[in-house]
Image (cartoon, grey):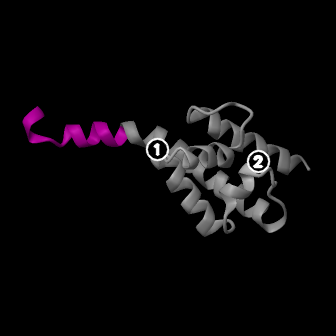
Amino acid sequence: MYLRTFFDQLDQMLCALFGGAPQTPISLAAAEAEVKREPWGCALCAWLHATLRQQHCPRVLAGETTTGFAAVSAAVQLAVLAWVIAAIGVLGPIAVVLWLDGMPLLR
């Protein structure tokens, strides 16, 4: 139960970080963006359809919740996504500095 709550909160935090409503799961925000034909919503829903379950976004819009294996799979994907975002946030600026340091025009 606690693990499910943790991943639900992680899901909502990721949605808020990307400009969504704080209490909204990211898959619901993606489904709404897909309806509006926003590129990020279409891409995320396509990824969810391929990796989580078929027609995930329409099911979320209809109010269906994710349970069982799909919920565990979604939790693992969210954890990996959060780790990647954190890694980019930490390593991204370092990579930019190293790249700029190696440019001959800036020396």
Q: Predominant secondary structure in magenta?
A: helix
Label 2 sits on a secondary structure element that is: helix
Label count reads 2
User: Residue pushed farthest right?
Assistant: 1
Q: Residue at x 80, y 50 (%)?
A: 63
N-terminal-most mark, 1 or 2: 2
Task: Name the quadrant containing residue 96.
Answer: top left
Q: Specify whether 18 is left or right of 71.
A: left
Q: Which numbered tag is attached to residue 88? A: 1
Q: Residue at x 68, y 56 (%)?
A: 58
Q: Who is closer to the viewer here, 14 or 47? A: 47
Please tell me whether residue 76 belongs to the stretch shown in magenta.
no
Amino acid residing under circle 2: Phe
The residue wearing badge 2 is: 7
Task: Name the quadrant containing residue 98.
Answer: top left
Residue 95: percent from left, percent from top: 34, 43
**Given this view, does label 1 or label 2 mark the residue nearer the observer?**
2
Q: Who is closer to the viewer here, 87 or 72? A: 72
Q: Specify whether 63 is left or right of 12.
A: right
Q: Who is closer to the viewer here, 24 or 38? A: 38
Amino acid residing under circle 1: Ile
C-alpha separation, residue under disc 1 versus residue under disc 2: 21 Å
Q: Who is closer to the viewer here, 17 or 82? A: 17
Residue 11 at least partly seen: yes
Mark 1 crowdedness (10 Å alpha carbons): few <14, some 14-19, many ≥20: few
Residue 93: percent from left, percent from top: 38, 36
Q: Is residue 3 above or below residue 54?
A: above
Q: Residue at x 78, y 45 (%)?
A: 8
Q: Which residues are magenta?
A: 94-107
Residue 79: percent from left, percent from top: 66, 52
Residue 76 at least partly seen: no
Please tell me whether residue 106 belongs to the stretch shown in magenta.
yes
